[in-house]
Amino acid sequence: MKKIFLIFMIVFTAQVSLAQVRNVKGVITDSEGVPLPGASVAVQGGQKGATTDFDGLYTIEAQKGQTLVFSYVGLETQSIVVGDAATINVKMGAAATNALSEVVVTSLGIKKTRKSLTYSAQELKGEELTRVKDANLINTIAGKIAGVAVTKSSGGTGGSTKVVIRGNSSVVNSQPLYVIDGIPMLNAGSGQPNDTFGSLSGGNRDGGDAVSLINPDDYEGMTVLKGAAASVLYGSQGANGVILLSSKKAKNGKANITASSVTTFESAAYMPKFQSDYVAVKGADETWGAKQKTDDYVKDFFETGVTQITSLGYSTANDYSSTTFSYANTSASGIIPGNTLKKNNFGVRQTAKFFQDKLTFAANANYTSQSVDNKPVNGLYFNPLTGVYLMPRGNDFNYYKNNYEVFDPTRNLMAQNWMTNRDIMQNPYWGINRNKSEDTNDFFNGALALNYKATTWLSIAARYNYNRISSGYDKYIYATTQGALSHINGRYYHEDALSTQRYADLIATINTKIGSDFSFNANVGTSVRNTMINQKTILDSGVGGGLKYANWFTLHNFNNNAENYQTIDSNKEIQSIFAATTFGYKDMLFLDLTGRKDWSSTLVNTEEGGYFYPSVGLTALISEMATLPEFINYGKVRVAYAQAGNDVAPFITTPTNYYPQGSGTKYNPLVAPKIGTSLKPELKSEYEIGTEWRMFNSRLGFEVSYYHSETKNQYLQVVAPVGNVQGVDFYGINAGSIENKGIELVLNAGIVRGDKFSWDAAVNYSQNKNKVKEIPEELGGRINLTNPGVNSYRYSLIEGRPFGVIEGINIKKDAQGRSLLNDDGTFQKTDFEEVGNSNPDFMLSLSNSFKFGPFFANILIDGRFGGDVMSLTEAQNDSFGVSKATGDARNAGGVNINAVRASDGVAVTKMDAESYYKQVGGRAGISGEYVYDATNVSVREVSVGYTFNPKAIPFIQTASISLIARNLFFIYKDAPFDPNVALSTGQGLQGVDIYGLPSTRSIGLNLNVTF
């Protein structure tokens, strides 16, 4: 009996002892609720320990009464005694040293600690994206990221944006990859203009892009991965850098309703200057007549634009699921009459956890619908600005405004009323009302994701994403439109474009420690990306064929089908495998090794069907490895090397017969590799070194990066010999090399940190130098990105010169710098030659943020220094005698020149104003005289506001109101237009203005409320 009792007591005691050991789990976050991966959890005085995963989650065995110690580099260590609760969530505050401890979202959505990064990655919080809100999210990052050049389109509200990270590196495309929650996004548009004179198919129209359609309020932040080492996991897609957007997540424990309303008023701010002293000869279409005062009606043509953006959001979450909804409405009227925009954004996100939180499911869907009436165009055709600017002075502009059409009894229709039949100049109100255009864009982005936590150190994730972008364009061109643009009975142009992307990946993530000193993180996966870009159907009644019956805009009324066709820009698939590892030693030394191999369908039938991209990087935390002065809180150095690149265009390695529009019987492959040759992908090799420091309790911090990259094997086309056995017009080749090297500096300072007043400042500086190192002899050492036609602007790549040379015509001069004249008094002119370059020498911005009690203020000053721009607008205005310069010259009795007659050396010091400007000006004139320094410094953003006390309004959690402004004024500018606006966001038409929409100044109110 005693033995039985003894055994019973032993078993009971063991059971009690075992019952006291439990699994304690939880999440560790920083002071803002951001999960901390790699945080350490240990049982005090014991051997047991654990590390949080990339979502900040941990699990550890501990007994009641034991103490858990939570530690993370740069944050205050916390000790918590285990009680009855099985879940212990910890929020860690900044340590006195406030070292770099934040988590950064990197490639494929992988979270890393900033201290471990071996490359440059700069972040913007959600507030920076919405503080001075723009209808296009990307416009708001201008001047906020070092090394990132942001150029706004002249397409007005709803236009696209050109972004170049660390310089142009590719002949074909230099735009970055956009990524949402780790998944690549298809940022396709229906096309960009590249015609100097303006397209005959509706004008130089900005076809838009997908990223301009998304809702800024859906995202909590942005990370810009600048170099190849940072983006190598995206392979060929990320060769030009990556912009990562992170969606807002619902916070656990409460439901939130957010609302924001932004109203801004836009005015045309930077326009050409016009003369009001001279009129045109009666019946003439240029203003070279008698002296007579006239009204400057141009400023009255432009209206005050209004943009209203209203956004609503709802989110709720608990331990097992979360739900988020969002809706935004944007309505805008532009500064040109008849230009309006309407946009609606819908978003939903749902997450759920199963099987004791081991399986996480997430789904999201976002849909945008946008319509734009009379989207502004640039160039000389279908552009109301040519009529506004060039109308012969002395005519009554208001008369033609109110009577832009008159009844024609012979044709029984309303006909255009205008004083001239010049091809580039119509009645602007006829263009607005009787050449009306309608643009529509629809964008869907949907994703599904599963993440299974197999063990404490291994998780497996699978994701699928679908993008669909559809674009429509209709142009209704009424009878009596200028004959170069339309048939006598009018013209109807219709275009539909569809782009899709299907993306899927499978990724295994390992996060563990090897002993007490070493950590090991790895991501191993595979992905597939299938894209179809711009499958188009184009219906055009044309100028020659036209409409059978006047102003009946339907396919049935087309006289023929000569201009109707269907085409596709791209259709390809990329299959990939990849792996990334990070080895850490004592949280002070980190080694990154990454590799990715892509197989692209555009490289079938080549010697290298697949291509491998590696990277290696090393980071050392000096502040952890050595004893530094007390004022230094953190010091880090890093170095990385990587390779990335681009595949070639589709339909090249598998030559496809091409039946061009209006080509008659021509039916053959357009381009193919020459027999006996094989194409390969572009190869971008880059190394980067950098250092990062924080000091004075993290009140002062800076990061410096130097990079050097070279992109070889550019895909180019050369003319194939006539009658070649392949029957192609061009051979596709790999040739050419473009080099970029530069330095970036990011400086942050907490100048004043008080209880009631604080002042923070940030500086972004970058300098990039690029060079076109090689262009094949078959192309003569040059590539024309924009051909001139009959105009005197050409945009080119020239071997030995920087990317993007502006070429024009100059006046010939003698050795003393005097202009050379012919015997008839006309200028001697050069052929096309380099007159400028569109790249800035360096970029510099300064932002200041102030808080004084409930009041706050933010100001961003942005500067681009160096580079050149050309204005064919000024040249044409001069030639027509409407510019202020021509009026001043006539008032002065002519133009002072330093010239000499070439035949006999006779000096000439003055020239008649009309003679001078008709030679120098005009779209085919001496364009070198219209090149300006692109240096400019502007007040890019301003916001001044007040944060309400939530205690005063019980049902409101937060509320603020602010006065906001964008592009408020230029502190310095030499050019007669805004050099930060481009006619195209493609590779061509850079550094030039040809009747682009004037840049606008925007002022308004921003109201934000959280319930």
Image (cartoon, rainbow, N blue to C red):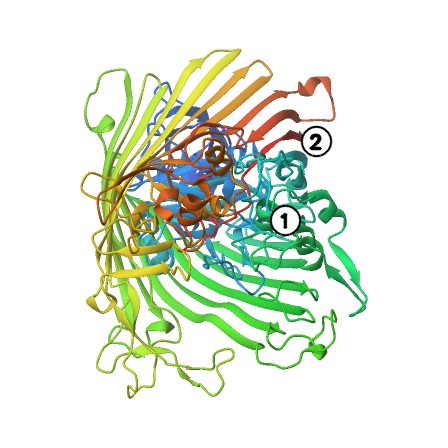
Residues under numbered marks 2 and 1 in contact, where contact means CB atoms less than 8 Å apart? no
Q: Residues within 10 Å of mark 2 (few under 14, many from 20)?
A: some
Residue 412 in the figure: left or right of residue 942: right
- Residue at numbered disc 2: 1011
Q: Residue at x 59, y 28 (%)?
A: 964
726 above or below 593?
A: below
Q: Residue at x 70, y 64 (%)?
A: 478
| Foreground residue among 486 and 662 | 486
Amino acid type, mark 2: Phe
752 above or below 844?
A: above
| Foreground residue among 790 and 532 | 790
Question: Where residue 143 sits: x, y (%)?
Answer: 43, 34
Q: Residue at x 28, y 66 (%)?
A: 611
304 above or below 676?
A: above
Dividing the picture into quadrants, the one containing residue 845 is top left
Q: Which label belongs to residue 282?
A: 1
**Residue 55 visible at all:** no
Q: CA distance from mark 2 to mark 1?
A: 67 Å
Question: Where residue 550 sits: x, y (%)?
Answer: 74, 72
Question: Where residue 170 sits: x, y (%)?
Answer: 32, 57
